[in-house]
């Protein structure tokens, strides 16, 4: 199966020193490629999620003197966006490609999602293999990957649920590959990982 079409020149865009130039390059050169990848993923991800999903480009932050460190395309069950909803995402940084599942942005639905994850914490902890390489991307530095999460522990899932509480940052977990590994990934490989992550997505989405 063909690769994802992401290679060294794409990751190299994160090496651009000037913040404005990097943001411009990511927006004009890399974001269209991620959206194209998203279009190829969409039908497969909808099957994995068990509902029709729409692709949304992640907003590229433009803060004076601060270069963007991540770019993503997110998939949610709303055509309007993904903020405050459960989403799946393909994300890129300087050194890694990620398959993620999470919730970002305030929403009245987060209370129900938090309760759903709390209620399923023990079952999620028993999933074993699908979550064996899961990482928690809360407050990470976009460089060194967080340690593999203790996903076998209900306490880990309870902690994730708390991240959905009022005023909290939200949930952001997933699987990562180095940019070297990403070169040999196929669309089937990527969808297979999202299939592994789908139990969490479904708990969140059904909890809305």
Image (tube, grey):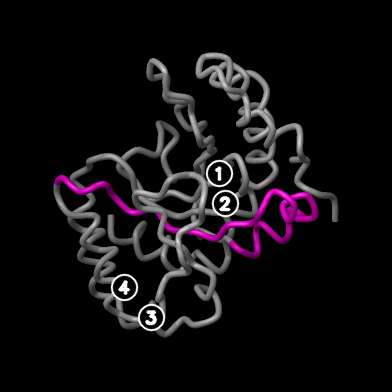
User: What residue does disc 2 label?
Assistant: 98
Compare marks 2 and 4 and give the one earlier in the sequence. Answer: 2
Task: Name the secondary structure under disc 1.
Answer: strand
Q: Judge left or right: residue 74 versus residue 65.
A: right
How far separated are the C-alphas under marks 2 and 1? 5 Å
Compare marks 3 and 4 and give the one earlier in the sequence. Answer: 3
Q: Judge left or right: residue 188 versus residue 164.
A: right
Q: Is residue 155 above or below residue 91?
A: below
Compare marks 2 and 3 and give the one earlier in the sequence. Answer: 2
How far separated are the C-alphas under marks 2 and 4? 20 Å
In the image, 144 versus 199, the foreground residue is: 144
Does the segment drawn in magenta span residue 7?
no
**Looking at the image, do the residues carrying marks 2 and 3 touch, with CB atoms under 8 Å apart?**
no
Name the residue located 35 percent from the left edge and 52 percent from the top edge.
138
**Looking at the image, do the residues carrying marks 2 and 1 touch, with CB atoms under 8 Å apart?**
yes
User: What residue does disc 3 label?
Assistant: 125
User: What residue does disc 1 label?
Assistant: 91
Q: Which residues are magenta?
A: 167-193
**Looking at the image, do the residues carrying marks 2 and 4 touch, with CB atoms under 8 Å apart?**
no
Tally of marks: 4
**Residue 186 image label:** none
* Disc 4 packing (10 Å; few <14; some 14–19; many ≥20): some
User: What residue does disc 4 label?
Assistant: 156
Q: Judge left or right: residue 28 versus residue 139.
A: right
Q: Is residue 9 above or below residue 181?
A: above
Task: Name the secondary structure under disc 2.
Answer: strand
């Amino acid at each position: 199966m063909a690769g994802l079409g992401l290679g060294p020149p794409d990751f190299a865009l994160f090496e651009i020193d000037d913040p404005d130039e990097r943001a411009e390059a990511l927006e004009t050169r890399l974001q269209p490629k991620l959206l194209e990848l998203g279009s190829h993923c969409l039908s497969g991800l909808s099957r994995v999620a068990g509902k029709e999903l729409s692709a949304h480009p992640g907003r590229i932050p433009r803060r004076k003197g601060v270069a963007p460190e991540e770019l993503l395309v997110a998939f949610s069950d709303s055509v309007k966006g993904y903020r405050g909803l459960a989403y799946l995402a393909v994300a890129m940084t300087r050194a890694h490609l990620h398959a993620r599942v999470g919730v970002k942005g305030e929403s009245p639905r987060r209370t129900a999602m938090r309760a759903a994850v709390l209620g399923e914490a023990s079952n999620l902890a028993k999933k074993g293999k699908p979550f064996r390489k899961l990482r928690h991307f809360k407050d990470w530095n976009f460089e060194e990957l967080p340690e593999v999460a203790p996903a076998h522990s209900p306490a880990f899932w309870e902690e994730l649920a708390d991240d959905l509480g009022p005023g909290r940052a939200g949930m952001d977990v997933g699987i990562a590959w180095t940019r070297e590994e990403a070169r040999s990934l196929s669309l089937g490989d990527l969808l297979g990982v999202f299939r592994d992550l789908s139990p969490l997505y479904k708990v969140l989405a059904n909890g809305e």
